[in-house]
Every structure is written in structure tokens, then in C-alpha cells.
Image (cartoon, rainbow, N blue to C red):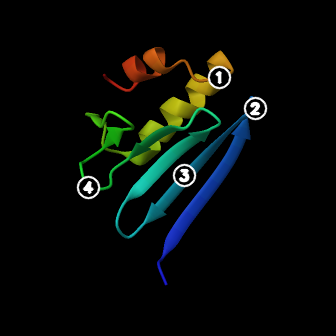
């Protein structure tokens, strides 16, 4: 059995899932299917695996959370800039 921490937050018709296991962590925003994780290739965004300079999942989570609060949705090109891409 895996040790796992899961957190789910709903804001502005979006659901943010944060999952942390022994192997790594993932942050997924539904229904946008915006995904950031650190499995296999360092900290990166899917689907293009663009690598982030920010390594702390809590900082990334807060950036995504504040973006959704401010915009009411995910505007991917703005969020990517906020994440350092």
C-alpha cells in the first residue's frame, strides 16, 4: 500500500487535485486538464513536458490557486508566465 496525501479544492467551477506519494507529486486542474508533476522528468507541465524552475509543490499550488481566484478560470499562457515559462 502506498503512502499518499491527497487534497482537493473547488474554486470557480474548477477542481484542483494535489496528490503526493513516495515517488513524487502531481497537481491537476479539472476540467482544464492542466497538469504539473515531478514524475520521471523533473518538475514539468503536461503535455509538452516544459520544465519549471520552481521546484516546491506548495509554491506552484499557490500560484495556480491564486490564478484561478483572480481569473475565474485557467488562462494557460498567463499561468505559464506566472510559473516562470
In the image, taking residue 10 as reference, residue 79 lies left or right, namely left
At 48% from the left and 76% from the top, the residue drawn is: 3
In the displayed orientation, state which residue is furthest to the front.
47
Which circle's residue, 4 or 2, is located before the other in the chain?
A: 2
Residue at x-position 38% and y-position 70%: 22
Counting other residues with Cα less than 10 Å from the Cα at mark 4, is it few (<14), some (14-19), or many (20 or more)?
few
Q: Secondary structure at mark 4?
A: loop
Frontmost of labels 2 and 3 is: 2
Q: CA distance from mark 4 to mark 2?
A: 30 Å
Q: Position of residue 76 (x, y in %)?
A: 49, 21
- Residue 8 horizontal/vertical position (percent): 66, 51
Separation (CA) of disc 2 from disc 1:
8 Å
Mark 3 to mark 1 CA distance (whole Å): 17 Å
Rendered view: 24 above or below 70: below
- Mark 3 and mark 1 lie on one chain; the one further toward the N terminus is 3
Which residue lies under the disc numbered 4? 40
> Nearest the camera: 12 or 46?
46
Q: Residue at x 55, y 37 (%)?
A: 33
Which tag, 2 or 1, sits closer to the chain's start? Answer: 2
In percent of width and height, residue 62 lies at 52, 36
Label 1: how many Cα within 10 Å (few below 14, some 14–19, many 20+): some
Secondary structure of the residue carrying tag 1 is loop
Residue 18 is tagged as: 3
Mark 3 to mark 4 CA distance (whole Å): 17 Å
Which residue in the protein does label 1 denote?
73
Q: Secondary structure at mark 3?
A: strand
Tag nearer the camera, 3 or 4 = 4
Q: Which percent across, then down, holds residue 2?
A: 47, 78
Q: Which quarter of the picture shows residue 68?
A: top right
Comparing 19 with 58, the one in front is 19
Question: Which residue is label 2 attached to?
Answer: 13
Mark 2, secondary structure of its residue: loop
Amino acid at each position: 500500500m502506498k503512502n499518499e496525501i491527497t487534497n482537493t479544492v473547488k474554486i470557480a467551477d474548477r477542481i484542483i487535485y494535489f496528490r503526493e506519494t513516495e515517488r513524487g507529486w502531481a497537481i491537476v486542474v479539472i476540467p482544464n486538464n492542466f497538469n504539473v508533476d515531478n514524475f520521471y522528468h523533473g518538475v514539468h507541465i503536461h503535455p509538452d513536458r516544459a520544465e519549471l524552475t520552481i521546484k516546491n509543490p506548495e509554491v506552484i499550488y499557490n500560484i495556480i490557486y491564486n490564478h484561478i481566484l483572480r481569473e475565474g478560470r485557467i488562462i494557460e499562457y498567463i499561468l505559464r508566465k506566472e510559473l516562470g515559462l
